Image: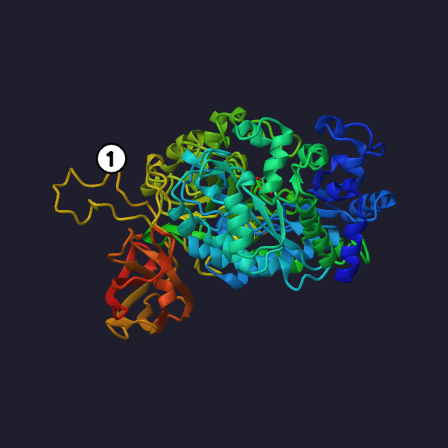
Amino acid sequence: MEEKKLRELLQSMTVREKIGQLIQLSGDFFGASDLATGPQEKLGIEPWAVQNAGSALNVLGADKVREIQKRHMENSRIPLLFMADIVYGYKTVYPMPLGLACSWDTELVKSCSRRTAREAAPDGAHVTFAPMVDVVRDARWGRCMESPGEDPWLNGVFARAMVEGFQGEMVPGENLASCVKHFAGYGAVEAGREYNTVDMSRWRFVQEYLPPYKAAVDAGCEMVMTSFNTVEGIPATANRWLMEEVLRRQWGFDGVLITDYAAIQELIAHGVAEDDYEAAKLAMNATVDIDMKTPCYANQLEPLLNDGSLDVKKLDEAVWRVLALKNRLGLFEDPYRGIDAEKAECLACNEENRSAARTAVQKCMVLLRNENQVLPLKSGQKIALMGPYADSKDLNGMWAVHGDRDAVVTLKTAFAEVLSEDTFATTAGCEMLDDYESLGDFGSYFKLGPTLENSAEEELEKSIALAKWADVVVFAVGEHMLQSGESGSRTDLTLPAVQRAWMERVLVHAKKSVVLLFNGRPLVLADWKNSVDAILECWFPGTEGAHGIADLLWGRCNPCARLTAGFPFASGQVPVYYGAFRTGRPADASSHSGRFVSRYLDCPNEPLYPFGYGLSYHTAEYSDLKLSDTVMRRGETLTVGAAVKNTGDVSGQEVVQLYLHDVAASVVRPAKELKGFQKIDLEPGEKKEVIFEITEEMLKFYDSDLQFAAQPGMFEVFVGRNAADCLVAAFRYETGR
Ligand code: BGC
């Protein structure tokens, strides 16, 4: 529709039609044949609000969406938007986002997002609530799984890749509009507890937490979702500084701003609004356009308009943004645009998507340990696969809510494709959890309880017998899939106790052992990692996870993934991340005696496995760090080069990482900051020179007045295989003052 026509439409709309555009309801509101009963009673809204609602949440399926849209259009002249959480796959599920990022492969991440959109759009989706790019540094938070990881800059790189992948050219039936979340800073909830407070200096917030969302907005992301947390004492959903000043004015975002689930009404529980009326007023003032699943906008915008507390201009602006998005999606010409049941059916978990998912798995699983080169497994070896994930289809992880669980290949199936009957045996081994009650109620979505068919003693005996028989025991262990994701906060980051105890008993009898870890966050492994030969971090790897894992185990491909969030040494260490400040008494370089430095008495300061860490089947040598100059003048660039040699006997990939450290500035600066990376291929014996350009932009940071600029002085430059293992050189930046 032409813009002029759209303006005319807005002008012709009744107040209730307008308010409707700002209301998002879940599927149950649209499913019932009699719209006057049921759900809206629970939410406390009237039938007009349902009839005029602008968007639906998490309802998908080509026929269902078509039917709902058809019924909706009988009472409304404005089509519904269908929005859903389609985060790392639709029916075909790719590795969870933290795993995907460990590929350090932006093209891969982009293509997984593109495929996800292609699968979901013909099934009726218009908008995906992704990417989630919260910086995550506290593994207690269950939502680490949804994020690319701990680094502000790298999260921004993946934010762009995902937005571009989902949105493409915004072709109906092919692409999805993207909604970046959770704006802002949700990854920093205190003590890692879900829905908790976030509070930090504005300086740090701007420097380290905002950049990934900004990258998504700069990439043209159509929507932004507010976060549940407070920012400087004001919940994000009511935070005018964050939404109006930063997002809209400074960043120029004129797309749709939606709340997270029920966040407007939650302003009351937060204690910043007395009732729905105040809550709606605060959110409108913060330029929040869509109210997800509360009665606040539906019931309060009319009274707010009537008593003059809400300017109709403000209402119109919000409605305009929603209409403009619908228009860009072509819904005014055809409310059913892009829906194609046959195409959806054809694409769902088809061969091509499955094969892409398998390739992704090969690039995302991180080899954490490989003693005595137990991996890759050799042909002819007798393998005992055991553990709660040995024959489990729960490999999709919590946020793959639309994923096809039946399509998931289990490890048992994938192993049986590689091994003959006389070299393969498997058993469940032990329960996933000691206590399933702690998982809480997840409504009708997931009902996952105890799984063992035999008694625990029988399973232990069987496991021991198989361990004695096998050349290599492969343990498939990890967190229950509901221990991470939303509301999956934990204080103890170890493997569930029942699994650790069982593994310990079985390990005594194992000749060689490999652990496949399935989990949604960095885990604490320190207590058992030295008792096993190899550990492969498998995350929640999705539909083709088991095939990709088998490819890696038997060396059909060489692991190349590197962590994008470090693994803590102990639970009490979190938040632990590579980009920390040095403090006045750094443990490694202080003139104070050993005791009076910044350290723990019972644990190293460093994570067990740092950011950027990962092994491969080849080894590599980094050498010959060369800076083009030891001085960089204003307006100039430097280059830094290093030689990387494959010293192993298989071809492989290295993720060569560039970090900088501003040695002395007007504010403290992180000990290292990632500024670039290159993923290179190396044949056995091959040596390549990797060259990075260092620009002035890379030296810039926010000072205490929030001015973004580079300051003169010494800089250290690091090139290496991970944040803790780098070559180092230094240069001076001069501004000629
Ligand atoms: C989550 C969001 C999600 C939304 C809609 C909320 O509970 O925090 O990430 O997009 O629900 O399902």
- Give ligand 1's quarter of the image: top right
State the image coordinates of residue 345 (x, y, percent, origin top left).
75, 53
Q: Residue at x 54, y 54 (%)?
A: 249
Position of residue 249 relative to residue 198, above or below, is below
**Residue 425 against residue 176 in the figure, above or below:** above
Label 1 C-beta lies within 8 Å of the nearest ligand 1 atom: no
Q: Residue at x 75, y 35 (%)?
A: 28
The x and y percentages for residue 8 are: 79, 55
Can the viewer see residue 669 in this picture?
Answer: yes
Q: Is residue 452 above or below residue 394?
A: above
Mark 1 nearby-residue class (10 Å; few <14, some 14–19, many ≥20):
few
Mark 1: amino acid: Asp
Tell which of 374 and 725 is nearer to you: 725
Residue at screen point 51% across, 26% down: 438
Q: Quadrant of residue 165?
A: bottom right
Of 276 and 210, which appears nearest the observer?
Answer: 276
Q: Position of residue 315 (x, y in %)?
A: 69, 44
Q: Where, quadrant-wise, is the N terminus in this rendering?
A: bottom right
The residue lying furthest to the front in this view is 308
Name the quarter where the C terminus is drawn.
Answer: bottom left
Read off the residue under disc 1.
602
